[in-house]
Image: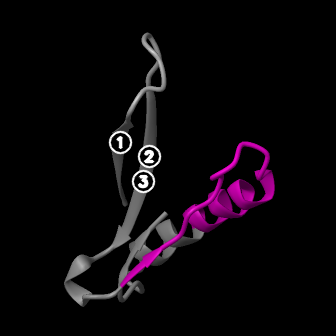
Amino acid sequence: MHSAKHRLLAASDGTAHQLVSHHFGDQAYGKKIYIQAGLHADEIPGMLVALTLQEELQQLEKEGRLRCEVVL
């Protein structure tokens, strides 16, 4: 897994926001799955699922069982 930080435009001076994406698997397979959670601040269940999924994806990647790229 590798993580990337993406800077977002600030709505006002003195503020900074970023989006973090976690990448699993390999781009070489030509298939990509994109999963997004927490688009709205009150959508907590999706974030909890994403955290659990992150652990599962790390294990699958470690075992060499991912045949695509997954961006979480």
Marks 3 and 1, how far apart at CA? 7 Å
* Scheme by which the image is coloured: one colour
| Horizontal arrangement in the rendering, residue 62 relative to residue 39 (left or right) | left
Point out residue 18 in the picture as x, y percentages from the top left corner.
43, 36
Q: Earlier in the sequence, mark 3 or mark 1?
A: 1
Membership of 21 in magenta stretch:
no
x and y percent of residue 6 in the render? 35, 43
**Residue 42's spot in the image, x, y percent?**
79, 45
Residue at screen point 64% across, 61% down? 50
> Dot 3 corresponds to which residue?
21
Find the magenta span and give its range.
32-55
Cβ atoms at labels 2 and 3 below 8 Å apart? yes
At 72% across and 42% down in the image, what residue appears? Answer: 41
Q: Are discs 1 and 2 less than 8 Å apart at CB?
A: yes
Q: Earlier in the sequence, mark 1 or mark 2?
A: 1
Q: Is residue 30 above or below residue 42?
A: below
- Spatial distance from mark 1 to mark 2, Cα to Cα? 5 Å
Q: Which residue is mark 2?
A: 20
Type of amino acid at the residue the image marks with label 3: Ser
Q: Cβ–Cβ below 8 Å for labels 3 and 1?
A: no
Residue 24's disc is none
Local secondary structure at mark 3? strand
Q: Secondary structure at mark 1?
A: strand
Residue 1: give x, y in percent of width and height. 37, 60
Report the residue marked by disc 1.
5
> Mark 1, residues whose alpha carbon is within 10 Å: few (<14), some, or many (≥20)?
few
Q: Residue furthest front?
A: 12
Along the horizontal axis of the image, is 53 left or right of 60? right
User: In the displayed structure, does residue 58 sit left or right of residue 27?
Assistant: right
